[in-house]
Image (cartoon, rainbow, N blue to C red):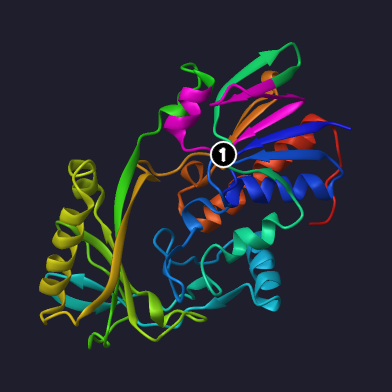
Amino acid sequence: MAVIGVIGAGISGLTAATMLVKHGLDVRIFEKSWRAGGRTCSRRIRPDFIFDHGAQYFTVSDPAFAFQVEQWAQNGIIAEWKGRVVKFENGKIRSTSPKGRFVGVPKMESMAEELSKELNISYETKIVHAAKNGKSWTITDEIGETFGPFDFLICTLPAPQARDLFQAEEHKVLEVPMVPCWSVFVAFQSKLEVSFDGAFVNGKILSWVARNSSKPGRDSKFDGWVLHGTPEWSSANFEIDAEIVEKEFLQSFEQLTGRGLPEIVCKGSHRWKYSMANSDGQDAQFHIKNQNLVFGGDWLNGGKVEGAFLSGRQAAFAVLDAFGLPLASC
């Protein structure tokens, strides 16, 4: 039986691994964090309050992803977020597309938790080196432990991390630049009286704001909001103190809404170093055929949750094709 190594337990890596396991392959996943999900993770600030501080929602257009979403919906893993989402243009509020927006329930990482249930995942294992030995691969973590051999590797890390891991300057696809995003999350004692639950801001500091507590399955005891910074501001201020970022974001949010903010119950922030690719997207996966190596991730497919899922799916197809295995129904 072929042994497959997957680096990264975000939606892309989990999707690829799930498909390959269904096809009878031995798959092992390595994840540097203590949990799966990547940017679909959520942050617990209090025992009773969780923020979606990364991916905010997802939409559906591809039939394969629609099929997966339907299964998640039937199992109560996701639900449609029916909050009012608008955009700010020249200081005025405009409507946005009525296209359905979906979220994990009761948190965004519920999808990753579901996908990872039956998978072999080594958490808190940061892979720092990969080496090709004949037809197989070995990988090494930051404490020097080596894993393998693997007949095929799938790497779903962001492009800069993948480039460092494989020291692969010849792989031009890994030169795709990625931009950061500061995320601030805050819970107010009382409801902030505005006419929207999410808004594309595209301002100097803020790019997006969302009433996290308006999403299905969330605790609505307090009025929770998530604020995302623009790529430009986040890049220029990536190293500054979190308290300064939180202050700047809340002041900007207050100016945006035109009203004083309610009393703060709790707040926090997170730096996403590789939030999105600064490109129009590439192919869904990049397969180095003579090396049994494939790169995947949302950054290869236009970003977003659907892009991550489809990239993982295509990465799995590349592995099945390499071993001449027929595609089973999945």
Q: Quadrant of residue 92?
A: bottom left
Q: Measured along the vertical axis of the image, is residue 10 above or below residue 206? A: above
- Residue 320, position as x, y percentages in the image: 79, 37
Q: Amino acid at mark 1?
A: Thr
Asked if residue 185 can be seen in this view, the reply is no
Residue at 47 percent across and 53 percent down: it is 39
Query: Which picture quadrant has residue 226?
Result: bottom left
Q: Over which residues does the magenta segment extend?
A: 138-165
Q: Does 161 appear in magenta?
A: yes
Judge whether 96 appears above or below 328 on screen. Answer: below
Q: Position of residue 325 (x, y in %)?
A: 86, 38
Query: In what quadrant of the picture does the C terminus appear?
Result: bottom right
Place of residue 8 in the rendered image (x, y in percent of width and height, measured from the top left): 58, 41
**On-image quarter of the N terminus:** top right
Query: Does residue 320 appear to the left or right of 70 in the view shown?
Result: right
Nearer to us in this view, 156 or 325: 156
